[in-house]
Image (cartoon, helix red, strand yellow):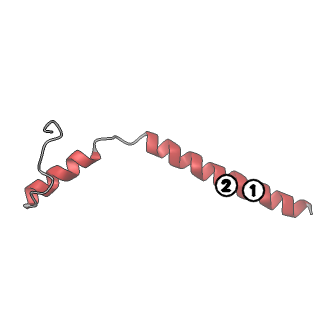
Amino acid sequence: MLARRFTIVCLLVTLFGMVFAILVADAGRSRRNYQTASAGSCLTGSKIFCRSPDQD
C-alpha cells in the first residue's frame, strides 16, 4: 500500500518536473527564429517567404 502511494507520488512529481522544464526552456528561447529560417530559404532559391517582417 505504501509502495503504491510512493510510486504514484513519484510519477506525479516527475510529470510536474517535466512540464516545468518545458516551460523554463520555452521562456529562454528567442522569438525571432522564423526570421532567420525565412532568410535561409531566400538564399536557397525558394521565394515563398522572402518578405521582410516590416512589409505588410
Residue at the (78%, 59%) spot, across then down: 8
Identify residue for label 2: 14
Q: CA distance from mark 1 to mark 2?
A: 6 Å
What amino acid is labelled 1 in the image? Cys
**What percent of the width, then of the height, locates residue 2?**
91, 60
Please indicate whether residue 33 sits to the left or right of residue 47 in the image.
Answer: right
Residue at the (72%, 58%) spot, across then down: 11
**What percent of the width, then of the height, locates residue 49?**
15, 53
What amino acid is labelled 2 in the image? Thr
- Along the viewing direction, whichever of 36 and 49 lies nearer the viewer: 49
Q: Quadrant of the C terminus?
A: top left
Q: Residue furthest right?
A: 1
Q: Quadrant of the N terminus?
A: bottom right
Say few, some or many: other residues with alpha carbon within 10 Å of mark 1 (under 14 / 14 to 19 / 20 or more).
few
Q: Secondary structure at mark 1?
A: helix
Is the C-beta separation of discs 1 and 2 under 8 Å? yes
Residue at the (11%, 50%) spot, across then down: 50
In the rendering, which numbered label is found on residue 10? 1
Q: Say which quarter of the image contains residue 14.
A: bottom right
Q: Residue furthest top?
A: 54
